[in-house]
Amino acid sequence: MMDRVSGSRLRKRLSRRQLLITAGAGGAGAALSRLAPWEAGIAPAQIKGTTLRILTWSHFVPAYDTAFDKFVAEWGQANGVNARVDHIPIDQLPTRIASELSAGAGHDIFQMNGQIQTTLYYKNMVDVSDICEKLGKQYGGWIPMAKNVAVVDGGWHALPEFYIAQPLLWRTDLFQEYGLKAPSTWEDLRQAAKIGKAKGHACGMAISHCNDSNHNWRAVFYAFGVKETDPSGKEPAWDSKELREAMRFSKALYEEGMTSEVLSWDNVSDNRYLASGVAVWIHDAISAIRSIQDSNPKLYATVNIGCDGLEPRGAAGRAAVVDPTTLAIWKFSKNQETAKAFLEHYGNSVKFSLVESKGYNLPYLKGWYKKPMPGVGEDPKVAKMQDWNKVAYVFGSPGPATAPAAEVLSTFVVPDMLTRYVRGEDLESAIKWGMDQIRNIYAKYK
Amino acid sequence: MADVEMATAERAAARHGTFTRDRLVFGYSLLAPAVLYMCLLVGLPFFFSLYLSLSDATVGSQVARFVGLQNFVAIFQDSTFRLALRNTVMFTVIAGIFKGLLGTLMAFLLIQEVAGRKLIRSLIVLPWTLPVAISALAWKWMFDPQFSAINYVGVRLGLIHGWPNWIGEPALAMAAVIAVNVWRGFPFAAIVLMAGFSAVPLELLDAGKVDGATFFHRYRYIVIPVIAPILFVGLLFDTVFTLSDLSIIYLLTFGGPMGATEILPTRAFEIGIQAGALGRGAAIALVLFPILLPVVYFLLRNLRRRETL
């Protein structure tokens, strides 16, 4: 009765003008509700006046840092948030993350880069499943690797940000000079390196305590069928005939095509090696050619990326073991809503990431692999990387990037095992050493 | 009369008691900051590390279980840890010997009366005062496998044959990190020794000369006994600094190749912080304690004996 009265009163009071305004506002509201907040330039009102601190790496494409800082500042201004980004070297990220967690204070959003520790820290990270599932639906789903770095116990605890491909970078002029066709397999590359080394143009892949070494040799091993774990990621599966085959090939590649300097390389040694004009090929992120694009355009013109638009083929197929990055929110953060609003905004800005990084940041969302990819498709040099999602793997494969898999990575077990073998230790003895290390690490987490 | 005497004695005893109590309170209050400092900054972290080493604490977990000596058993079963332990001892002893020799030589040179002595002294301590990150990076360039300045100069002067891979070959890598540690540390040894030399009475040295003592005799029987307290304290400091020197190895070799330059601090950092296994990392770091303890005990006992002579 009461409702009916109120309703009739309301109808009586509603003028035509009011009806139009209400209808207009309702229509606009309905339209806005179909748009994501970032598209409407609106974030939840409660984040206004809050602060947001982001911890990320110093990007290997320095221009991206400038663009990202501006991107964050503009989002902050638009939403009344005092937002700031702190960049630190990639090697310092694991330490900083550990110390922030121990102190229970620090940044609101933090990046994991290369060494993914989601399984170790997920209980202290905010569940961002709502954001990731929404983004997945919107952009045709996530590539399988995304779940390996961000999902633990069925929940998304980080936003897969981007991954860094480490493709083959080879000298077309030298291949031509040696009468070789464009490489397609690891065996082709071994032959090229053998000829190149004899002519003063050895190839180079670090076999040392650096991140490049971890990823590059995994790319070879995976191509030969090596598996790190069972699909659950709980049991190590390294010890196999495929590993022995991969090790034999790797030793031959080292002896025939490299010099011993790769045993002391760091993450930028291969960049310098390519820039010096000596290398017949290296296997590294595209920052290695970006750094010579302006300084040595002649050399830049001779460098080609990838094999058949993908990674070299091994006995079991092609594999690109990439450097993954994720962004996560600490549970101790007092600005979790602000952080989530930003992640949602940034997760929708893949185009920005692709274009500003000049194709360095490759996306985890399938929808962005429609050709031509922004920032990648227009550049003939990197356009070949538009299918990288088909061969991209992350360490720990086929299982997820678990804490023990990350420890195998961070303690450089694989490069050390290979170093032992290439320096003359018996194959079985080197593998036994490596397997003992890996078994001890996995046993610790049981 | 007796009452008066008793009252006076009581008053005197009371005054004496108050005086003693006041002195005690005053003494302890002077001592308190040092004790508090030791407890908070040394004792607390030490006992916390001990607690961590007996637990399965990880960086990501809020709750840690008591696991007894499990972490210690596990680390001694790890061949990389055993290698790191051996490397730590080798690194400390060899670097210590070279720092002692070069420091002594430098101290003798620095006490000579030459023009621009102050400038020379300030230049000599430069390696020690430079931030380690800068000096380690400069050395990294000098040891670079492709662009090594040492190799470039050495080969042209005929001192080096071939092109040594300083941080890629296990033995050379260890030599390289020791060389950088010595380069950084010997100015400290020189300054400590120089301070000691200035305390040696000239009359003693002159008397030695008159008695026909050679330079080495004077050094062995006059200088060393006089400067022993300073020498021991310097040695103690240097041993502690070298044993816990993470930065040079972290920046130059990251423990490679094949763990050839892995020392206990780098291993503890890798396992405890980077891999997040705080318990095991603490156990690795604490292995330094029983190594250091006899060194400290021996040096301090020796120092006390000399003081009582």
Image (cartoon, rainbow, N blue to C red):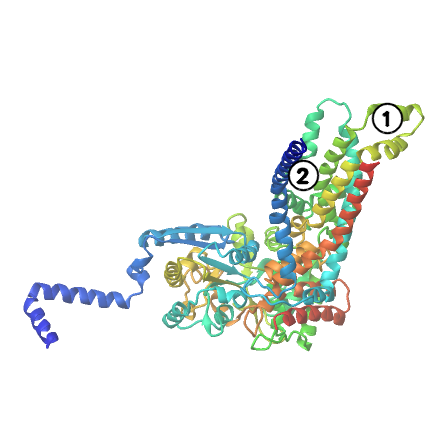
What is the chain identity of the residue bearing mark 2?
A: B
Q: Picture coordinates of residue A153 (x, y %)?
A: 49, 74
Q: Are marks 2 and 1 on the same chain?
A: yes
User: In which image quadrant can residue A176 be found?
Assistant: bottom right
Residue at the spot x=70%, y=33% of the render? Answer: B124
- Amino acid, disc 2: Trp
Q: Is residue B113 left or right of residue A324?
A: right
Label at residue B205: 1
Q: Picture coordinates of residue B243 (x, y %)?
A: 72, 50
Q: Is residue A281 visible?
A: no
Q: Which residue is the extreme one toward the right? A: B212
Q: Is residue B297 left or right of residue A243?
A: right
Label at residue A435: none
Residue labelled with disc 2 = B128
What is the chain identity of the residue bearing mark 1?
A: B
Count residues near mark 2 (Cα–Cα under 10 Å), then give few for <14, some for 14-19, many for 20+. Answer: some
Give the camera-side residue of B191 and B129: B191
Give the camera-side residue of A60 and B251: B251
Give the camera-side residue of B176 and B199: B199
Q: Is residue B192 left or right of residue A293?
A: right
Q: Could you give the CA–CA distance between mark 2 and mark 1, rounded to whole angstroms?
A: 31 Å
- Amino acid, disc 1: Leu
Q: Which residue is the extreme one toward the front? A: B1
Q: SS of the residue at dot 1? A: helix
Judge whether A121 appears above or below A261 on screen. Answer: below
Count residues near mark 1 (Cα–Cα under 10 Å), then give few for <14, some for 14-19, many for 20+. Answer: some
Q: Picture coordinates of residue B59 (x, y %)?
A: 56, 61
Q: Nearer the viewer, mark 2 or mark 1?
A: 1
Residue at the spot x=65%, y=74% of the render? Answer: A238
Q: SS of the residue at dot 2? A: helix
Judge whether A66 appears above or below B308 on screen. Answer: below
